Amino acid sequence: MTIKLDGSWQNTINTSGISFKCGYCGSNTAPVKGYFSANFNAQKFGHIYICPNCNKPTFIYKQTGEQIPGIFIGDEIEHLPENIEQLYNEARRCLSVNASTSTVLSCRKLLMNISVTKGAEEGKSFAFYVSYLEDNHFIPPGSKEWVDHIRKKGNEATHEIPSIDKADAIELLEFTEMLLRFVYEMPGKMIKHRS
């Protein structure tokens, strides 16, 4: 949940005909206030739009459509332990600013944290945590290879020079989201349903 920024923006201009998904609050928005940058020929290059939902600014570069902050990839997940939720949202935030390597490192760290919240001993290797998740049936059948892929990409991000590309980071975040739903959200919904 995003808190609305207090106050009002000064010296804005009226805007129209634009819509985007806010990188702060996630709402689909059509702002009516903002700013723009222009040269002496009145060519507009960049715009700062104020989200009417959260009152926070978003920069959009006209030539490329680049948006800062970018939108979060992945959806919110219910019934997550606080530390898991914080780390998952950190991975999503990293991807929204094109920090793909950091996204993958966060996903790798999530594997360890998930295992520990489900009873694994701290201070073990990541291979141990992958095996723990599989041996204790916390991952769906046929998913061990995906979980191991996150571990290997995390190792690559940690120990090798090249950065991780965005497509790999998105793919790993999507799998991590599915794993979190399987481990926490679906059981949490059933507990809520039973009560």
Image (tube, grey):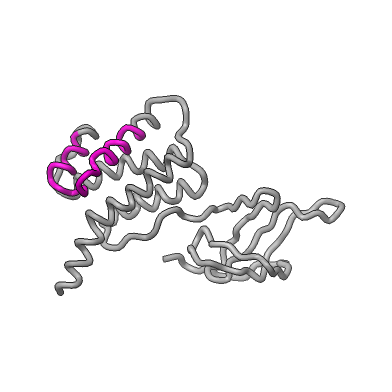
Q: Position of residue 146 (x, y in %)?
A: 29, 41
Can you give x and y, in whole percent of width and height, for residue 167 in the image? Answer: 46, 41
Quarter the N terminus occupies: bottom left
| Residue farthest toward the bottom in the current orientation of the protein | 195
| Residue found at x 51% / y 44% | 98
Q: Position of residue 90 (x, y in %)?
A: 40, 49
Q: Which residues are magenta?
A: 128-154
Q: Is-magenta flag for residue 77? A: no
Q: Position of residue 28 (x, y in %)?
A: 53, 67
Total marks placed: 0
At x 26%, y 62%, the residue is: 79
Q: Nearer the viewer, residue 142 or 38?
A: 142
Looking at this view, name the residue that lies furthest to the right.
41
The residue positioned 69% from the left and 57% from the top of the image is 47
Residue 30's quadrant in the figure? bottom right
Between 28 and 97, which is closer to the camera in this rendering? 28
Quarter holding the C terminus is: bottom left
Which residue is depicted at the point 67% across and 51% down?
A: 61
Which secondary structure dominates the residues rendered in magenta?
helix
From the viewer's perspective, tell me whether residue 38 is left or right of residue 86.
right
